[in-house]
């Protein structure tokens, strides 16, 4: 029902949506034939649904300059790393959003991670296609300390890592795991199955590299087809 106040509908055609901030109980529906240019974020908003048969395109999402310590820049250049003097954005980022669902859409050309759930419980991702990720760190699905994850029947082609189970990064303060009185220090009960993976440079199915947390357990990768991998 397009009149539903909790529905954000994008029909066939091109839409320059920019930043889409979702709220609890909302559904973002990208219909077949629609291309939505932008990115999606939510925080502390349960029951979010991002569904449809259209395309979410991150190619028009611009990086933001950020100050960089000269010593760090010199170190990055000496090691041959990409210099981190800009802030890039994930195509979909959900922080502390329980009972979220992402289904059916195609996501292309993400500036950073394509789908990044952080501390989300009962997350479902099904039938999603990820393509056009040619940058370093333009990973497919990277999750941090989530619980109760089901990823099924997705097609993911990335230059960098495709599906990652992660804890927190060592540079983040311990306080970031404590949110509204709940300590999000575990990643448990994830099942990734029936996915088709093509990874040009990074890892296809990975636990890490960030693994900071009390435990990571009950992670199952089952019946996934690896079409191509360059790295180990």
Image (spheres, rainbow, N blue to C red):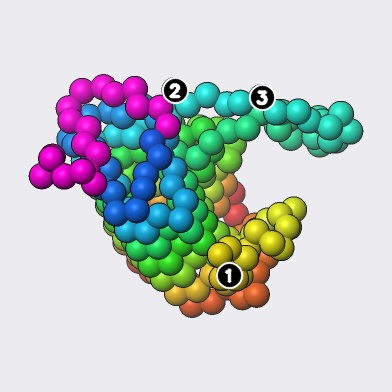
Which residue does the numbered mark 3 point to in the structure image? 65
Which residue does the numbered mark 1 point to in the structure image? 181
As helix, strand or loop, the secondary structure at mark 3 comes to strand
Q: Is residue 72 above or below residue 146?
A: above
Question: Furthest residue to the right?
Answer: 71
Quadrant of the rendered image containing residue 222: bottom left
As helix, strand or loop, the secondary structure at mark 2 comes to loop
Categorize mark 2 by other alpha carbons within 10 Å: few (<14), some (14-19), many (20+).
some
The image shows residue 142 at horizontal and vertical percentages of 51, 53
Q: Is residue 108 visible?
A: no
Q: Please tell me which of labels 3 and 2 falls first in the chain.
A: 2
Q: Is residue 82 left or right of residue 157?
A: right
Residue at (46% x, 62% y) in the render: 120
Q: Is residue 224 above or below residue 73?
A: below
Q: Nearer the viewer, mark 3 or mark 1?
A: 1
The image shows residue 219 at horizontal and vertical percentages of 48, 72
């Amino acid at each position: 029902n397009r009149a539903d106040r909790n529905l954000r509908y994008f029909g066939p055609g091109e839409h320059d949506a920019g930043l889409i901030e979702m709220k609890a109980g909302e559904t973002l529906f990208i219909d077949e034939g629609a291309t939505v240019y932008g990115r999606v974020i939510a925080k502390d908003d349960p029951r979010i649904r991002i569904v449809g048969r259209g395309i979410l395109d991150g190619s028009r999402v611009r990086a933001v300059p950020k100050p960089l310590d000269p010593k760090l820049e010199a170190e990055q250049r000496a090691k041959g790393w990409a210099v981190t003097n800009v802030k890039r954005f994930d195509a979909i980022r959900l922080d502390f959003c329980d009972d979220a669902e992402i289904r059916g859409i195609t996501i292309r050309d993400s500036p950073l991670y394509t789908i990044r759930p952080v501390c989300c419980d009962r997350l479902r991702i099904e039938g999603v296609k990820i393509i056009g990720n040619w940058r370093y760190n333009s990973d497919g699905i990277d999750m941090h300390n989530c619980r109760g994850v089901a990823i099924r029947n997705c097609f993911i082609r990335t230059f960098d890592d495709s599906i990652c189970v992660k804890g927190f990064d060592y540079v983040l303060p311990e306080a970031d795991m404590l949110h509204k009185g709940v300590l999000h220090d575990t990643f448990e009960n994830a099942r990734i199955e029936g996915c088709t993976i093509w990874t040009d440079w990074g890892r296809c199915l990975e636990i890490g590299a960030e693994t900071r947390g009390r435990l990571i357990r009950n992670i199952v990768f089952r019946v996934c087809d690896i079409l191509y991998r360059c790295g180990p």
